[in-house]
Amino acid sequence: MAKREEDTLKYERVLNALKSRIQDGTYAAGTLLPSQHQLVTEFDVSRPTVIEALRLLRQEGLIETQTGRGSFVRGKVPAITEQRSYPGQRLLDESESDSSAELLQAGIVVAPLKVATLLEIPPGTKAFLRQYVISDQGGPIELVSAWFPLDLVAGTKLSSPEPLDEGIRRHLYGRKRLRLDHAVERTLSRAATPDEATVLGIEAGAPVLNLVVTGHDSAGHARQLVDAVLPGDRHELRDVYPLS
Amino acid sequence: MAKREEDTLKYERVLNALKSRIQDGTYAAGTLLPSQHQLVTEFDVSRPTVIEALRLLRQEGLIETQTGRGSFVRGKVPAITEQRSYPGQRLLDESESDSSAELLQAGIVVAPLKVATLLEIPPGTKAFLRQYVISDQGGPIELVSAWFPLDLVAGTKLSSPEPLDEGIRRHLYGRKRLRLDHAVERTLSRAATPDEATVLGIEAGAPVLNLVVTGHDSAGHARQLVDAVLPGDRHELRDVYPLS
DNA sequence: TCCGCCAACCTGACATGTCAAGTTGCTTTT
DNA sequence: AAAAGCAACTTGACATGTCAGGTTGGCGGA
């Protein structure tokens, strides 16, 4: 931070110029940015350099690019927020029909290493996955993957391709007398995989907030895992608490 | 997710190939990846394509690149974790001498728009900034910026270039009878700015976890703001709580 | 008037090539 | 044997150019 000794890198020069124009309103929200060719001319750099600057702007969520049209300045980040003290608790309870959720898949697949580890099943084992995207009017805002050990799924409606009309946790409690005792919630920031990027309509490699919540029974064993991926530029978790 | 219809994109082909080789141990941790030129030959693509794949791997924290040497496979993410229920509380209380903190600056600067808004001061106003990096043996892991309205700083040791030996909050309480009532904590995931990337030794645009904590007095006014930026691939916030 | 076609733009995904700067290891000189 | 020097390799940061595919608006025919 401090003072920038010099803008030696060309793409940074372009990046900073565009960024300040967006912030001071020269390029208002919704506006179309100059085309790459125009920027090439104005800054006297090559197109890849312009592309690099635009890529970073896109990654920061400041612009949005449409093939064949151009790059638009995005509106001031609405910073969709959450209130509940434990955002993960919401995930465990979530009823898919509450919000506009679109089921992507519901079936038995090989659990990725990370999931297998957390669910305490051998690597390479299959598990049940129920995956859906949640959208608001602005587009997709959350990719949720709910994982369960196979023995939990039999006799429940989890494998049905229809949205669950009651919360997952209540559903399991009703059918299997499964009682969750406590949850472990992990919050991390990582790059979107190309797959996630496609589903969420963001850039591959763009930052996402990743909540991984495991529900444990009283013996301490993980019985359920919910993984939520939220585009970083559209989400902010907020929490208010008293100071001693 | 689901099945990838086809790896039509060349950089994705390379990316996935390298990723699975890293995961199945073909390229063990600490190993040097084949050079860009070798990859060009092997996958029969151009260097920019290889570079794009490597860039994404770097962004996901799977590799680390050194100019003139090559790309190394990073060790299994140690996922440095935190325990306290409110990670932000730690920030407000933090004593800089606890951990190996290096003070970057301590002085009066113009507050960025976001800081000004949260601290409830007019845009463009100056505020006091105390900024430092915290490292462990593996390198820098946290960039902390503590902001205060100017009237709070007079008569305290905050402007001293030496590390504070007591927590910020205790220090303020002792000198100014400042009593914080509650905190608002925001957690978000965003792309590292080039400046932050330099300080933290990561890629510009790489995902970072950003904690923004404001301390409020009993009238509800923000009196202190602490902004912590953590490299996404080295941090994970963990929280355990009972389920009703 | 309305519809369909096409030219003009625009971005995406590459290929090729250049130059600078950092690393490494071997060779040559002292 | 130790030190200095250089060649070979590697990444970073560009420039230039090509082709495919999406978008848009205008023009001409039905």
Image (cartoon, coloured by chain):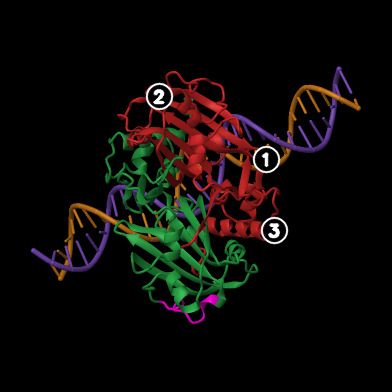
Chain colours: A red, B green, C orange, D purple
Q: Residue at x 66, y 43 (%)?
A: A70
Is tag 3's residue or tag 2's residue first in the polypeptide sequence?
3
Chain part drawn in magenta: B152-161
Pointer 1 with pointer 2, Cβ within 8 A: no
Pointer 1 with pointer 3, Cβ within 8 A: no
The numbered dot on residue A25 is 3
Q: Amino acid at mark 2?
A: Leu
Structural distance between the alpha carbons of marks 3 and 2 = 54 Å
Q: Residue A55, how many percent across, how many down?
A: 55, 47
Q: Foreground mark, 1 or 2?
A: 2
Q: Residue at x 61, y 36 (%)?
A: A135
Tag 1 and tag 2 share a subunit: yes
> A69 or B40: which is nearer to us?
A69
In the depicted structure, whether residue C4 falls above or below residue A58:
above
Q: Is residue A110 visible?
A: yes
User: Judging from the image, what secondary structure is the residue with disc 1 in?
Assistant: loop
Residue that numbered label 1 is attached to: A69
Structural distance between the alpha carbons of marks 1 and 3 = 21 Å
Q: Callout 2: 10 Å neighbours few (<14), some, many (20+)?
A: some
Q: Callout 1: 10 Å neighbours few (<14), some, many (20+)?
A: few
Rendered image quadrant of residue B158: bottom left
Residue that numbered label 2 is attached to: A152
Q: Amino acid at mark 1?
A: Arg
